[in-house]
Image: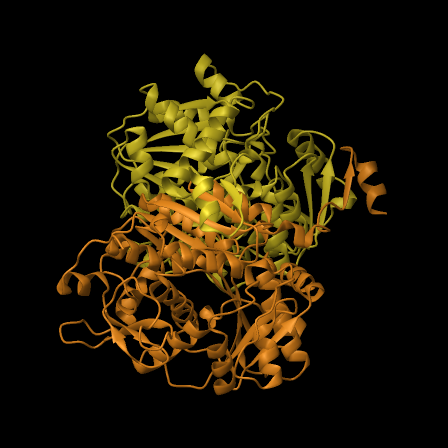
Chain colours: A orange, B yellow
Amino acid sequence: MSTIELDAPELASSFGPAVALSCRECGARVPLGPQYVCVECFGPLEIAYDFTAPGRAPITRELIESGPASIWRYAPLLPVPADVASKPNLNPGWTRLVRAENLGRELGLRSLHIKDDSGNPTHSFKDRVVAIALEAARTFGFTTLSCSSTGNLAGAVGAAAARAGLDSCVFIPAGLETGKIVMAGVYEGELIAIDGTYDEVNRFCSELIGDEAGEGWGFVNVNLRPYYAEGSKTLAYEIAEQLGWRLPEQIVIPVASGSQLTKIDKGFKELIALGLVEDAPYRIFGAQADGCSPVAAAFRDGHDVVQPVRPDTIAKSLAIGNPADGPYVLDIARRTGGAVESVSDKEVVEAIRLLARTEGVFAEPAGGVTVGVLRKLVETGKLDPSAETVVINSGDGLKTLDAVAGAGLTATIPPSLAAFRSARS
Amino acid sequence: MSTIELDAPELASSFGPAVALSCRECGARVPLGPQYVCVECFGPLEIAYDFTAPGRAPITRELIESGPASIWRYAPLLPVPADVASKPNLNPGWTRLVRAENLGRELGLRSLHIKDDSGNPTHSFKDRVVAIALEAARTFGFTTLSCSSTGNLAGAVGAAAARAGLDSCVFIPAGLETGKIVMAGVYEGELIAIDGTYDEVNRFCSELIGDEAGEGWGFVNVNLRPYYAEGSKTLAYEIAEQLGWRLPEQIVIPVASGSQLTKIDKGFKELIALGLVEDAPYRIFGAQADGCSPVAAAFRDGHDVVQPVRPDTIAKSLAIGNPADGPYVLDIARRTGGAVESVSDKEVVEAIRLLARTEGVFAEPAGGVTVGVLRKLVETGKLDPSAETVVINSGDGLKTLDAVAGAGLTATIPPSLAAFRSARS
């Protein structure tokens, strides 16, 4: 693989508090590099940190609060250089935590917030993970940014590469929503549709990494995955800080690969370990669509392994039939006293409309999945209505207009009061 | 008109530093209320303030910097109550000021920033103005929020009313972009298309205010217009604060009604008067599309009055043929040494693509108009390429996909390396 050579001090400053890649299964450690699979046991690699190494400034609430209004306020907790905010990137994050009193009232919840990630630069949480992967790509000397994507990631990679001055080539399954295709193509990188499911696109990208055609390419969610995945921790940090440095008692998170959910759990645990929040219990709930619910099915059946499925749902951004982090999601949901639940496409659409009508937030189907599952969890008594609850909206309804195609005009009239009165009578 | 009765102290606390409505033409003052036209001379009413009244805390940089990450950090400069941030609203603003080094290099500009308002809750600058109008509507006891809209305002009003628990009924010209119609309709208020231009929709709304059908309605851009318009000042405040409490030397602003441009000028002047920024000269440039360029035409011809036109441009959010603030725009452009310029629809599309390719920002045609005019101003020598320049992107490309319908897939292939190589050769 063609990358620039870095000596140890350079690497150390490029990755901030990160010190190694560590296997999630066997714990084996390897130096930071563009690897993602453990050579010992084929387990997934993730970032290991030393937040309290000699010479590092203590990480305090005040330090974070004095940082920029983006994920870079948490740079001391991420595998990025200290000067990351000054480099050309999309500066995602620090999105709104909406106090959802209307929706809470309608569902019978005492305290509900929506973490609305549609405010990110390309309007999904994917800007967070790509921003971290981009810094790793720069450090490793990659000249092309790539990915397999269910749609949102394609736009996030195209935009980030444009800002950073890198080439991009992204791969999507054929048949995605028009909004996602145009948004991925407008940045003028390469955009290639593959006849197949997301899981087939993903396998193709793994092949491409071993091929000379993929030389010098950083696949954000494949060979840069350990870095990329850390971006989701920033959702945990922001929610805790925006609640006044407190963990929510319950949180509902969409599950595609499962990475977001596992990293939010990791983020909460880091905040506790660093003394930035009180060590209080929290319950994590995963949300899937019935048409792609392998993790919810395993949770329901009491299994530890996840049986892959072929997705069939309007929640295309969650349509990963063979979720890499499925077993970890099951483990976290069970350990924290949460659950993994799914809802039908009909319930997804109803939840999109409910969220729009009550809070003025227009979500894509993934947001409909989390709000729909939230409702179901309340109705079935699995979620405590008196506990402080956060639900994540990871994307934007503008990219998936077909889901609410019925929404629109009440009437079309000539410009006259008589016509107006008659249209309303 | 059916509104709640407020005594003077209540009114004073509801509108913060605002003390009266003042006629822009004759200077006559009337008490704060749902009025918009001077009874003396039919001139437009705007908000008059007393920022230094006895008992008011001094407005300092530190006070503002300690506020929330939304327009409410500037509450002491706006006609809103001090506790406005705690009320249910969309908390817009504090959007990214993007350092646009790639675009600057391409255009030959030394220092260029993009104020990217696509990060607002409904993805346009309209959330700013609606948030202020909403507070006034609450104070006056209106139960329905309404407007005439070229598209973005419709979504902003629908979402804000949903969050605030008010009814909404918005009016748009027939033939708007699908994204704008769905986004306006999804919040489940009334959405009525009028067969006619925006100017005809606007006239219809003025009629409706005098009719019993419009009783108890706050039209954000008609009877609440003095409050609404002040929201655009927050663009000026944010740009100055994000530049490190400094005014830009040049700024390019889209011109529809002209209100945004005049209020940014007002905001800059307030910051100087309050000693929050140094008193340095700035030049203001207005941007229009050729197909609706009555202000640019008047500027070019040296006229003080603006001749109305019938709009014909893809920049529908700027398609106001009879711009209320046109004469003020002309005055400001001339006084500050700026200009008002226009570009063709072809140049608008090229500029959308240029902005996406260089900075990863996906703008709607209004953003293409400002970037296109920026380019034209540099090429014709009207803009100083060595001076610090800011350009405003007021909306989001996701709402107007047709403008870049050509953007999209490079290729569709089966999942094989051979097919990939052959597609790229």
Residue drawn 35% across and 39% down?
Answer: B268
Point out residue A290 in the picture as x, y percentages from the top left corner: 65, 69
In the displayed structure, does residue A18 sit left or right of residue A335? left
In the displayed structure, does residue B64 sit left or right of residue B182? left
Residue drawn 62% across and 49% down?
Answer: B183
Most foreground residue, B417 or A161: B417
Residue that sits furthest to the top in the current view: B301
Point out residue B78 in the picture as x, y percentages from the top left corner: 45, 50
Most foreground residue, B37 or A295: A295
Point out residue A351 in the picture as x, y percentages from the top left corner: 66, 64
In the displayed structure, does residue B329 sit left or right of residue B38? left
Residue drawn 21% across and 60% down?
Answer: A14
Most foreground residue, B321 or A172: A172
Where is the C terminus of chain B found, in terms of image quarters? Answer: top left
Total count of labels: 0
In terms of image quadrants, where is residue B195?
top right
In terms of image quadrants, where is residue B100?
top left
A348 to A423, vertically: above or below: below
Most foreground residue, B411 or A261: B411
Point out residue B15 in the picture as x, y percentages from the top left corner: 50, 53
